[in-house]
Amino acid sequence: MNSKDNPRIGVLALQGDVREHLAALYAAGADAVRVRRPSELDDVDGLVIPGGESTTIGKLLVTFDLLEPLQKRVRDGMPAYGSCAGMILLADRVLDAPPDQVQVGGMDMTVRRNAFGRQVDSWEGALDLAGVDGGPFHAVFIRAPWVEEAGSGVTRLGQAANRIVAVRQGPLLATAFHPELTGDPRVHALFVSIVKESAR
């Protein structure tokens, strides 16, 4: 793998804000690359699963033969960060999911899809996030999920409207919002620090 000072972090490049996540990771000091194939997954120290449509991303993971390799790497301790749809995919349990919903799993939590409403209900707000210095974070919520229930091993990092919207479990991080759309790399910097910590 790569040096602890410059971790190689992939962005799952099947759907969603791939370019924006790559830019935020680069700003946070990572060597950021696109991941579309199992061989590319093998070559990263951590992975970002971007927003988009969780059912579609799940189907594409199967189509690109990435689902089982990704599940194995997460089980084996690879750091992963999921935003919005990525949060849904990292959850062990999902409410309001279609029957064909595919899960990567790994986080002991129950997530409700589209919990804050439809596209027209998208909103933005300032959040206090544990582990993120520098004041409140401007969070963008688009058809966002929330964490309905978190297991004892899951640390709650942030809340909005009295709902859990940011969590961490070991090397896994998830947010219901889209930090890549803000130009503020602090959430990505937190993930880069988790990847470095995991590599030690």
Image (cartoon, rainbow, N blue to C red):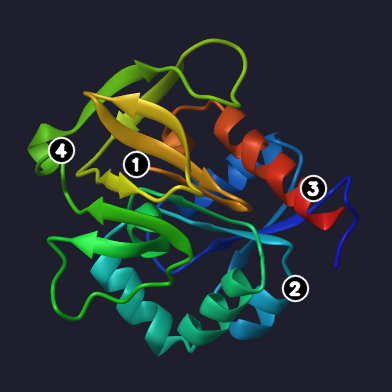
Residue 38: which quarter of the image? bottom right
Q: Which residue is mark 4?
A: 116
- The answer for how far apart the CA atoms under marks 3 and 4 are is 33 Å
**Can see residue 133?**
yes
Q: Amino acid at mark 1?
A: Ala
Residue 99: which quarter of the image? bottom left
Which residue: 43% across, 72% down? 104
- The answer for how far apart the CA atoms under marks 3 and 1 are is 23 Å
Q: Which residue is mark 3?
A: 196
Between disc 2 and disc 4, the foreground one is: 4
* Relative horizontal placement of residue 199, taking residue 136 as reference (left or right): right
Total count of labels: 4
Q: Residues within 10 Å of mark 1 (few under 14, many from 20)?
A: many
* Relative horizontal placement of residue 122, taking residue 26 as reference (left or right): left
| Mark 3 or 1, nearer chain start | 1
Do residues under tags 4 and 1 come within 8 Å of each other at their CB atoms? yes
Q: Quadrant of the N terminus?
A: bottom right
Which is more toward the observer, 72 or 114?
72
Percent of width and height locating residue 60: 36, 79
Percent of width and height locating residue 66: 50, 82
Q: Which residue is mark 1?
A: 176
| Mark 3 or 2, nearer chain start | 2
